[in-house]
Amino acid sequence: MARIAFGGFRHETNTFAPVKADLEDYQIGGAYPPLTRGEALFDAIADMNISVSGYVDEARAQGHELVPLTWCAAVPSAHTTERAFETVSAWLLEDIAAAGALDALYLDLHGAMVVEHFEDGEGELLRRVRGVVGADMPVVSSLDYHSNTTPQMIELTTVMDAYRTYPHVDRGDTGRRAARHLNDLVQGNGATVKAFRQIPYIMPLTWQCTETEPAMSIIETLKSLEGDGVSTLSFTAGFPLADILHSGPAVFGYGRDRAAVENAVNALAEEVEGREKEFAG
């Protein structure tokens, strides 16, 4: 049994929108549970189809000791304010530092957070987290399908796993997959290599649905490429309403066989790149 901390900080940022997400928006939550810290988090997320809830259910079944940190989400809007980001980040880091000895960390992130003073909100948060937990601790994160996945996000995590549906009906399942990755890591048989490819075009939101082509068959290809040294693959379609450097789709994967992981990521990325015209609608 491992001692694993968990928390999260989620926002989908439309940089063209008129209203920003301030601290009070995270404290209210809106469509999500309100900002919660510590033991109250278990009740706040219970029985919900969100990643953190799926993670907790799976990790409990694995027998791990779970240490709740800070978790919050605000409804989609313009930038997260500097005040909100700095306050919530500080609380999360305080909770990690106060948690004592830990074997691993799970974070429920979105992947498309833009902050008033940072384009890559998740990348900056993860940089600060690594400053507390160190470079070697397993850090696993779940992501939204609309994540604008950045090189820094990939670099600073051990494994990231994204939703495979839009509409997002598999949020809890994604959290459960993240828990299985983290379980493998703390047992010493998890993914040891990663590969990452960004896609050089932007997909309109109206053509990203995984219940229609071309995304539907891309997800089926993704599933077919897993196994044989490839622990997991993800395709994030991106959130084009975030007007930032790394806005756009990406493909990434993890496993224990470097050649297999790189070949799988390249094969999936080449399929996505080859179907650019179909995403034009």
Image (cartoon, rainbow, N blue to C red):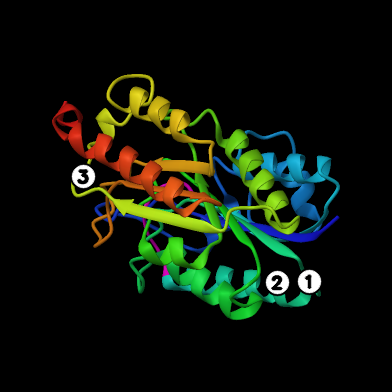
How many numbered dots are placed on residues in this image? 3
Kind of residue indicated by mark 2: Ile
- Write the start and end of the magenta stretch as one range: 75-81
Q: Residues within 10 Å of mark 2 (few under 14, many from 20)?
A: many
Instruction: Name the residue beneath numbered marker 3.
Output: 202
Which circle marks residue 99 in the picture? Answer: 1
Q: Secondary structure at mark 3?
A: loop
Kind of residue indicated by mark 1: Ala
**Residue pictured at 52% horizontal, 68% vertical:** 126
**Residue pictured at 53% horizontal, 28% vertical:** 169
Looking at marks 2 and 3 on the same chain, the residue that comes earlier in the sequence is marked by 2
How far apart in space, not on screen, are marks 2 and 1 (Cα)? 5 Å
Q: Is residue 99 left or right of residue 154?
A: right
In x, y percent, where is residue 140?
Answer: 60, 56
Whether label 2 touches label 1, CB < 8 Å:
yes
In x, y percent, where is residue 240?
Answer: 26, 47
Up/down of 32 relative to 79, above or below: above
Instruction: Name the residue beneath numbered marker 2.
Output: 96
